[in-house]
Every structure is written in structure tokens, then in C-alpha cells.
Image: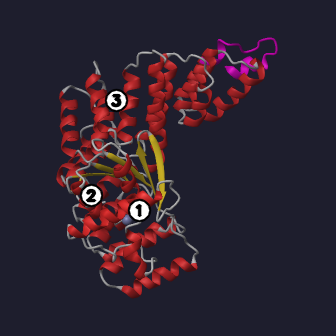
Amino acid sequence: MYSRILTHASVKPNNYTYPSLFKAFGSHQWLEEGKSLHVHVLKFLGSPIDKFIQASLVNFYSRCGKVGLARYIFNRIMEPDLATWNSMLSAYARNATFSLVDNIHGNTGFSLEVLSLFSFMQKSLLEPNEVSLVALITACADIGALSQACQLFRQLARRDAFCFNAMIRGLAIHGRGNEALGLFRKMIREGFAPDDTTILSVMNACSHVGLVEEGRKYFKSMKSVYRLEPKIEHYCCLVDLLGRAGLVEDAEEIVLSMPMKPNAILWRSLLGAARVHGNVDIGEIALRKLLELEPETSGSYVLLSNMYAFLNRWEDVNRLRSLMKRFGIDKTPGSSIVEVNGSMHEFLIGDRSHPKVKDIYSKLEEMNKKLQEFGHLPRTRDVLFDIEDEEREEALSYHSERLAISFALLESDACVPIRIIKNLRVCVDCHSCTKLFSKMYMREIIVRDRTRFHHFKNGTCSCLDYW
Ligand code: ZN
Ligand code: ZN
């Protein structure tokens, strides 16, 4: 239709033609077609672009998952209306929803942007509706601000399946498995049909609270009850669930028999389970597959090496070490970001660049002394093998999250939880120390590492020491 308008020389597309075209392209996610239409808009109409066209562009890019482009257009709209706000907020929320099992670190920036957008929206005197609130619940859950999300959920006058999904997901990724399952049952009682993201959250919840049989049951129910086709994410979750419970062989069977090709996340999950439960045979198989898929990533070598170290197989540790050297593989430096009084501070391992470096390190000394009083023995055996032995124990206490905790203890309000985002997996020693920190300073510490959230409270962690 549109191409007919274009070829017909006497008819030029106008302000009324474009919005409906963008709408059609957006609902089919025809990104390339929409992009060339965007070019036409710029060519035929020139600037400034009509407000309705801008709004339809935001909606189009949002539906196609192009958050950056949607935001770029959005920023140029003088007074966006509620529908445009919601397109923008949903773009962020949609991006967050697909990252439950996969690397969740990358979306943190998104969530912070949504929250800043929201405060901006409040200033514009627009009243948010259900759509905006769902986006916000997702965003809050994503950055660990779960109490805000619960509050938003209670505020909702009319709840639909999307609201339930956002809230169940929020509870699940924060390890509040029983609450997530309770809410799921409520959702079913109220007559809403779950979709595949709901089931994913529910399985995740089961995984957190160790309800293996329940988790398997929900996985099976996808096909048999809800007529949903399990996606690779569901298989990832199932493998995680079985792995946590020590059913490493069952997990392997799932990976080997699933209908699609297992990805790196699945093999890594299996490798992680094999490591924790000391199943070297399966660990080696998983590692070989991982190296085929991601030869330059250091994480898998480190996981397997830690497993060998645990079994005192030092020759194998050395073999892996030289393999890494041969391939020229470097470890990604660990970094932790902590939010204190509204601003973000980043720390690297052994970082001395912060203006308050002196205070941070003397606080760290105090923390280490207290750890000893609590009878903590550093676990150096599991720590990355390429730190030289004599440096190991010292280096541990300078891991980026410890610097971040030290800084937050110094600078932040004693009644608010400490929120940290780490780009790598939390090491075993930092994990047990953070548990102790949460107890001895009576502070809730929330760490989001490469794969999951850890809520440290009164000496325990929500992951139940499996991560
Ligand atoms: Zn550490
Ligand atoms: Zn944990």
C-alpha cells in the first residue's frame, strides 16, 4: 500500500499516513521496513517532525526492542502524552523481562533510566496508569528496590496478567520464592492465564526455595495444562533447579535430550552444578562444550579450575592455567558499583582511585579485624587460580565488593540497605564475609552479581549458598 503511495508521483505521504504505518510495522516488528519509513519521514517532511509522528516512532522502536532509538526520539518531544510515556517505559520493561536467566547485569542501566524517567514523569503532572506501573514494577525489581515494587503493586486498582507477571518475577529473582508461588496461585485463582514468562518466574522461584518436584511439575504443566511451548530459558531454569538440588545427572540428561541446541548458559549452569557437587566427569564434558561455544571467555576455565582445586588436582589446575596463557585469555577485572545517597560509585579490585581512599581502607582494616573475631578463615583455595599464593589472602580483602561495602558503611544512612552491582560472580570468600558483614553491622546488603541477586541479612543469604 505504502509503496503504491510512493510510486504515485502526484500523491505525497503526509502527517496522517505515517502514524498508522508505523503502528502496523511496530506490531509486526518490521524493523527494516520501519527504518526506511523513518528515512522517508525525514526526507519528505523535513524537521521539525510532527508530534504524532514522533509519538508513533517512539512506539515503533519500543515494540521492535530498540530502546536507545526510542529514547532518542522521545527526548526530542516537547510535551509527551501518557501514551508516549508508556511506550517509552514499556520499552525498558520489555528489555528487562527477557533477561531473567541470562546475564542480568547489562540491564541495570536501563532500570535506573526508567526510574529517572518516572520521577521526570511525576514532575510533568501526568498521572501514570497500569501500563506505566507495570514498567515501574519491573524496573524496581530489577535494581533490587523490591519494597517499592510491592508498594506499586498494592496501588494498582485493576490488576491484569501483566501486573502479576511483573510482580511474580520481581519476587522470584529476589529469592522470595514462597511469596512468588503464593502470588502465582492467587493469579490462577483470580482467573488469569499465565504465559511463558510467568512459568519462567515460577520455576525460578521453585529453584530458589529448593522445591525441585514443584519446579518439574510447573515445567511439565506448560505443555499439558497451559499449551505453552517451553523455550530455551525454561530449560535453563530446569537445569539450574536440578543442579542446585544436586541432581547433576538429571540436569545433564535434560541438556542432552532437549529439542533445541543447548547454549553457553546451559552448559555453564551444568558446569556450575558439577563444580558444586564435585562431579568432575560432567564438569569436563560441559567445559569442552563451553570452550567450543565461547573459546575466549575466562569464566569457564575458572569454574573448572576451582573444581580441580577443590579435589586437590593441582596438575590439572596448572594444565588449565597454561592453556589460558596459550590462548592469551585475560580475566575481566571485577568491578562493583554501589549507590550511595543517589550517586553511583564504582570500585575495581584493589582500587585506590576514590577520593576517600584513606577512610575506605581503614574501614576495611576494621572490617577484617572483626571478621577474625567472628572466627572467619579466608577460603583461598577456591579463588581464581592465577593470583599468586602469597597474594591470595591479601587480595581477597580488596575484592571490589568489599571496597564498595566499606564505602557504603562509611557514607550511607545506617537504616537503608546497601545495594551493589557486580559484573562477575561473587567469590566464595566474599560471599561468606558479606554474610558476616550483614550480621556484624546489622545492615541488609543486596548484591546483584553476574547471574543473580544475593540478599544478605543477619548472617545469611537468599541464594542459600548456591550461586
Ligand atoms: Zn571476592
Ligand atoms: Zn548469595
Q: Is residue 407 visible?
A: yes
Front in this rendered view, residue 27 or 297: 297
Q: Which percent across, then down, holds residue 414?
A: 29, 44
Residue under circle 1? 361
Crowding around mark 1 (Cα neighbors within 10 Å: few <14, some 14 to 19, many 20+) is some
What segment is highlighted magenta in the picture? 1-19
Disc 2 marks a residue whose amino acid type is: Phe
Q: Specify the quadrant of the image occupied by residue 255.
A: bottom left
Q: Reply yes or no: does residue 8 show up in magenta.
A: yes
Amino acid type at circle 1 is: Tyr
Left of 87 or right of it: where is 235?
A: left
Secondary structure beneath dot 3 equals helix
Please tell me in which quadrant of the rendered image residue 42 appears: top right
Quadrant where the image shows the C terminus: bottom left
Decide: is 292 above or below 402: below
Question: Which of disc 1 and disc 3 is earlier in sequence?
Answer: 3
